[in-house]
Image (cartoon, rainbow, N blue to C red):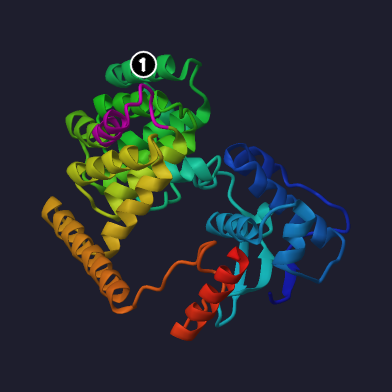
Amino acid sequence: MSTITLRAEGISDVTIVPNIFIDQYMPSANGAYVKVYLYLLRLFAGNCPEVTISSIADRLENTEKDIIRALTYWEKLNLLTLTRNSQKEITAISLTDLSSLQKEVPAPVPYMDSELDEVAVSIHTESKPAVRQSYSPEKIAQFTSNDEIQWAMHIVEIYLDRPLKPMDLQLILYLYEELHFSCELIMYLYEYCVSKGKKNTSYIEAVALTWAEEGIDTEQKAKEATASYNEHFNIVNKAFGLNRAPGQIERQYITKWVEVFGFSDEIITEACNRTILRTQKPDFKYTDKILETWFKKNVKSMADIARLDEEFSNSSKNIGNKTLDMNKSVPKQATPNKFNQFPQRTYTAQDYAELERKLLNKGL
């Protein structure tokens, strides 16, 4: 890992956290990202000219990947600039003087609360939310004067089970103005996310951006899209005999089978059935190995599975026949026992005559 040179504008010999960072950026940022930014401020205040990603990760008890993700996040918001070499390693970090920024700054990009949230959103897409603008109080007032939007906001409050916060209003206005979501679609978006136990603003925005990219612009299209995913879950549950919703890791497996492998429900069901027959339990990991093998062998239909089964059966027969032939070609040897485990003596006619003479003499 290369050494990184630190440069800053307007940083003194004490650690100062600008109010604009606390007011505008910190509320919506991941706590881990905030830690990285604050630590950078501390490094600059301590006149530390060089640092490494590894040293930052060790200090904050994070992975290097987490640190790079945080730096990239703040770079997107123009709070710092990253310089990279030809190997795309970060070689310099330049902090921006926040006092030079305008009062109204772009709203922070959404973040994922955890890796599980990130995976949950990837059920729909691999895209990343973009930076969106911040709406003025005047614009929000004008927006909320619409009766239809007021009703949608009321429904959203019911779903969230709390009053709307400024960041909620910013997101709803963004959905309506920029993504051109109807009020019905906005209400269903919140209904869907809350039904998955996700009330996080960043998660809701990520799902909304996914829908926009996929051309989902009506409530009906959204219901059809989400129903298709739920249907996959229901099919696996039925095959495994589960009377509960699949857990997060189990959802990841199902998503992999559908989106990465591209298998039909029929093939997935077959793999689940074979898992139950062989393990006597719903083992997602075992099913994943079956499907991964089929994927590598380019299985596209049940006919392909039947072909593989036949090839395996023929291969097993050939191995059995070869073993049988080898056994036939090797002559069998007598199995040692208590009667033949000693060397056997061969008697001649003279030996028998001598033995008979001795017996007759004993009789006399």
Vertical comparison of 34 with 50: above or below: above
Q: Is residue 172 above or below residue 288?
A: above
Tell me: residue 64, above or below residue 34: below
Q: Nearer the viewer, residue 148 or 64?
A: 64
Look at 19% across and 33% down and name the residue there: 224
Residue that numbered label 1 is attached to: 155
Residue type highlighted by circle 1:
Ile
**What are the residue bounds of the magenta stretch?**
231-246
Which residue lies at the image location 33% right of the left edge and 37% below the top edge? Answer: 276
Identify the residue shown where x is 61% and y is 61%: 68
Residue 27 horizontal/vertical position (percent): 61, 36
236 inside magenta stretch: yes
Q: Quadrant of the C terminus?
A: bottom right
Q: Position of residue 148 (x, y in %)?
A: 27, 19
Question: Quadrant of residue 21 in the image?
Answer: top right
From the viewer's side, name the closer residue of 98 and 54: 54
Say whether residue 274 is magenta.
no
SS assignment for the magenta stretch, majority: helix
Instruction: Kindly indicate the quadrant of the structure image that contains residue 173.
Output: top left
Q: Which quarter of the image is occupied by the N terminus?
A: bottom right
Whether residue 122 is visible: no
Residue ranking furthest to the front: 364
Dot 1 alpha-carbon crowd within 10 angstroms: few under 14, some 14 to 19, many 20 or more: some
Q: Position of residue 253 (x, y in %)?
A: 38, 45
175 displayed left or right of 140:
left
The relative height of residue 289 versus residue 353 in the rendered view (above or below) is above
Residue 355, x across and y down, in percent: 54, 75
